[in-house]
Amino acid sequence: MEFPDRAAAEKWYGSAEYQAILPMRANNAISDLILVDGVGPDFTVAGFAQQVRDAIKAASH
């Protein structure tokens, strides 16, 4: 998802509407929410997720 700025993302996250459905996501899916301030044109969520998985795997050995 993309927001015009961090304030808008935080407003969405804290909204009553999202907070009402958050337990459904948190209790039924393995997921993380990460807010970042801007990314490069070659950024992909899949690539970032792989980097995170690789770092966790490396740290566990």
Image (cartoon, rainbow, N blue to C red):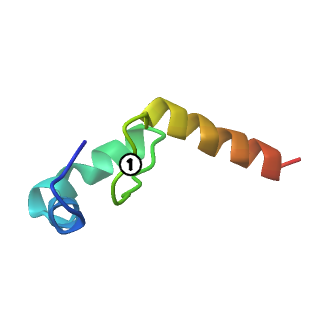
Vertical placement of residue 5 versus 24, above or below: below
The residue located at (81%, 46%) in the rendering is 58
Q: Which amino acid does the dot numbered 1 rest on?
A: Val
Quadrant location, the N terminus: top left
Is the residue marked by circle 1 packed among few (<14), some (14-19), or many (20+) residues within 10 Å? Answer: few
- Residue furthest to the right in view is 61
- Residue furthest to the front in view is 41
Q: Percent from the top left, x then y, of residue 51?
A: 62, 40
The residue located at (36%, 58%) in the rendering is 35
Q: Percent from the top left, x then y, of residue 40?
A: 40, 44
**Front residue of 19 and 34:** 34
Q: Quadrant of residue 44?
A: top left
The number of numbered discs placed on residues in the rendered structure image is 1
**Front residue of 14 and 5:** 5
Disc 1 element = loop
The residue located at (60%, 34%) in the rendering is 50
Vertical placement of residue 25 versus 5, above or below: above
Position of 19 with respect to 42 (left or right) is left
Q: Which residue is mark 1?
A: 39
The residue located at (33%, 43%) in the rendering is 25
